[in-house]
Amino acid sequence: MKITVDINVLLDVFQKREPHYAASAQVVSMVTAGTLTGVCPAHGLTTLYYLVRKHASKPNAEDAMDQVLRHFQIGNLETADWRDARDLPLADFEDAVVATVAKVTASAFVITRNVNDFAGSPVPAIAPEDFLSRLAAVR
């Protein structure tokens, strides 16, 4: 299964943000293990680097980049896709871009802690905890 992972989930992991760390880390671990195919929106890479460096260190930020680039597909958009994102009925443009990346990459879900912000997304959004519960119910 392919999923698009919102930056807030990656930040939970690389900054060990509680109380969200455990579920987010489990989702990311499934990507690194190859159980899931993870997509990281390209526009989120610089934000991830900046915030990890700001709150930890340059080596931590470089390690985060190396891990994401090693284990995740990077979701890029073409000009027409950016226009499509602009036309989505989402309040936040960044969330609309994440939703469009999910659509373009044929992801089954957007994994995010801001599920309500994705109302109107062409790809359903789900919180890490709920995603893990759904996977467990299927197995």
Image (cartoon, rainbow, N blue to C red):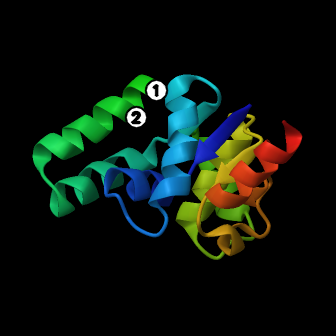
Question: What's under tag 2, amino acid-wise?
Answer: Val
- Are the residues flagged by discs 1 and 2 in contact, CB closer than 8 Å? yes
In the shown orientation, is residue 75 left or right of residue 130? left
Mark 1 residue element? helix
Determine crowd level at label 2: few under 14, some 14-19, many 20+ residues with C-alpha closer than 10 A.
Answer: many
Point out residue 134 in the picture as x, y percentages from the top left corner: 80, 50
Mark 2 residue element? helix
Residue in view at x 51 percent, y 41 percent: 28
Point out residue 78 in the picture as x, y percentages from the top left corner: 58, 37
Question: Residue farthest to the left?
Answer: 58
Q: Which mark is residue 68?
A: 2
Point out residue 116 in the picture as x, y percentages from the top left corner: 70, 74
The residue that mark 1 highlights is: 71
Residue in view at x 80 percent, y 54 percent: 122
Residue in view at x 19 percent, y 63 percent: 55
In the shown orientation, is residue 122 left or right of residue 27? right
Residue in view at x 60 percent, y 59 percent: 112
For the N terminus, the image quarter is: top right
Question: What's under tag 1, amino acid-wise?
Answer: His
Using the image as rendered, state which of residue 77 and residue 26 is in the foreground: 26
Point out residue 35 in the picture as x, y percentages from the top left corner: 64, 26
Separation of residues labelled 1 and 2 (CA atoms): 5 Å
Determine crowd level at label 1: few under 14, some 14-19, many 20+ residues with C-alpha closer than 10 A.
Answer: some
Residue 76 visible in this rendered orientation of the protein: no
